[in-house]
Image (spheres, coloured by chain):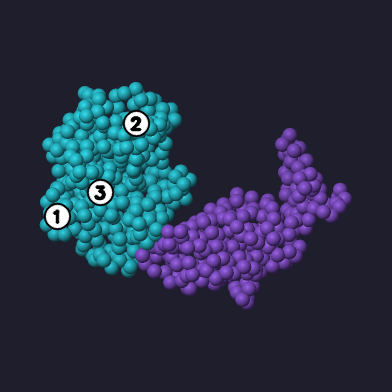
Amino acid sequence: MKTGLMESTCVSSQSKGQCPLSQNVANSERVLSLLGGGSLLLMGLKRGSVAGLLGIAAGASLLYRGWTGHCHLYEGLGINTADLHRGRPGVPAQQGSRVNCALHVNRDRQELYDFWRHLENLPQIMQHLQSVTVIDDKRSKWIARAPFDKTLEWEAEIITDKPGEVIAWQSLPGSQVETAGSVHFKVSSTGDGTELAISIKYNPPGGRIVTQIAHLLGQDLQAELNQDLREFKQLLEAGEIATNAIAPEEGQTHKPVMTSLKVEKA
Amino acid sequence: MRAVSWHGKEDIRVETFPDPQIVNPRDAIVKVSLTAICGSDLHLYTGRIPTMQAGDILGHEFMGEVVAVGHDVTNLKIGDRVVVPFTIACGGCYFCKHDLWSLCDNSNPNAWMVEKLYGHSPSGLFGYSHMLGGYAGGQAEYVRVPFADVGPITVPEGLSDEQVLFLSDIFPTGYMAAENCQIREGDTVAVWGCGPVGLFAIWSAYKLGAGKVIAIDRFPERLKLAREYCKAKTLNYEEVDVFTMLQELTGGRGPDSCIDAVGSEAHGTTLDAWYDLAAEKLMLETDRGHVLRQVIHSCRKGGTISIPGVYGGFLDKVPIGAAFGKGLQLRMGQTHVHRYLPRLLEFIREGELDPSFLITHRSSLEQAADMYRIFEQKQNECIKVVLRT
């Protein structure tokens, strides 16, 4: 999908002549390396078997990586995460993880655009978002749910806005999370309804390792986005979210009725 | 409430469950008066459909009385007698708007499961596996019916439950099978399988202008109904060579359209039928394709093949070369029940057909386990079982 913004952001800098021990690991990753390395080392020492020895070795190398901020593997692979999170908008190319979703909604294009342009609506349809607060015409403050009941915050600005066609946004320098996203609206070629193409990119602190951990914890952003948008479509086309439940769940709260987009019954 | 539940291969029980309640604004609760066991329920009984869970309530052919409605259901009122389509459809998506109700985008809460298998999800169904929605089925005293404002059809006074129950599935399914044949006046249509869907397909083919319908099965009682009630020419595939006979009956050209009303549990007497059994035992295929192969082989060049028989997974050795070489059209899919309900109810009202002609077994919900066994083993000339609650 064409988003037009990822490509224009900076490419991670590989050009500084790196001395062998220059930092190429981001600080957040260094902390994780220190923690992980330490626990592996302790586990290895406790066990004392062959696996234990391997644990000691792996733990030690992680500790080294965390302490010096230099990773030989990254050097070999030409990766440098140290320069990330240092005051650049959006998400650098080749970094973070991207989720895409395309769907057809049997509703008017302008109506859907208006709903999305009102960014405060987004937490109504995206379960990983806690809130979006609009600061001014361009800027907004986002709070998202993260693993271990933590939250992540960032400020974003709208970088493309073509009414009825496309909205794109990206995080501002200094954010906890680097993120960018876009949504394109197109009248379906058959004339009925609108085709939406959504793309969101995240580069959480800790990089891909954290994304993988989140995945293991069952927080799979792609699956979550698919389900979110499926329910969004159901609300707009069917007026309710399909369920096979035979009784209302205890303390069930229906999803809030969308404020700026009237939900009509089919 | 009492309901029929699935507990594994050939393990059907009647158990007590909590009564369903209104969950969504477009729901209704139907108190079931009459329900049936469908041939496709036997695919569940024999453990052929994936994503079933112990304790799932079965049944997708049911009717009864509306006892509660959600606040968005304005077309039904408490006390209405309704027949409920087995396909659940929202009425608002692209597919519903295009009269393709069984392909509804919004009625399967477990769409992600079947998307992995099929690429996209068809509509949710009552009592037919979790990948198709995980909805509690109609072989029960009460059923929660979602999107009740677009599905159930109110039954006029003067028609018995037995006359209208089959509007829920098999009558529309047989009718759509015939419609998919694109019959021109005088055409010859061959129908494999004289179970309820096959019988309704024979009747519907004549209704839509067929000059001759040839019905194929091996059970004498089914062939008798096809011959005597539905006026088909019948062939017993255990006694004659089907291909040869079909060519003889059509001047060597083959039937203009062929209907596979058997689906994935086909039986046969030829080599490929044994191949299917072996492949299935070795888990090399999930569906037995013997009938479909014979259908493709027998159909005239440029003819149409219509498949109302249920296939769920993968089919081996499909003669796609023959289908291509003969320029065949294949049309298939779950029935768009909503599309046919008013039309078919009218046929029944005008007395053109009394669908209850094929009921052979009448029993109570409590006897469901026995009735599944009898139906599966085709004991006592069993063709169609209805259960009173």
Q: In the shown orientation, is residue A132 left or right of residue B359?
A: right
Q: In the shown orientation, is residue A21 left or right of residue A183?
A: right
Vertical arrangement, residue A77 with respect to residue A227, above or below: above
Output the chain of dot 3: B
Q: Nearer the viewer, mark 1 or mark 2?
A: 2
Question: For this rendering, which residue is in front, B268 or B147?
Answer: B268
The residue where tag 2 is placed is B293
Whole-Å distance between the Cαs marked 2 and 3? 25 Å
Q: In the shown orientation, is residue A41 left or right of residue B381?
A: right
Look at the numbered disc 3 and give the secondary structure of its residue.
helix
Dot placed on the residue nearer the N-terminal end, 1 or 3: 3
Vertical arrangement, residue B172 with respect to residue A87, above or below: above
Q: Position of residue B136 (x, y in %)?
A: 34, 51
Dot placed on the residue nearer the N-terminal end, 2 or 3: 3
Q: Position of residue B27 (x, y in %)?
A: 33, 62
- Asked whether disc 1 touches disc 3, contact meaning CB atoms under 8 Å apart, the reply is no
Q: Position of residue B257 (x, y in %)?
A: 27, 38
In the rendering, what colour is chain B? cyan
Q: Residues within 10 Å of mark 3 (few under 14, many from 20)?
A: many
The residue where tag 1 is placed is B349
- Numbered circle sitting on residue B172: 3
Output the chain of dot 2: B
Whole-Å distance between the Cαs marked 1 and 2? 38 Å
Whole-Å distance between the Cαs marked 1 and 3? 15 Å
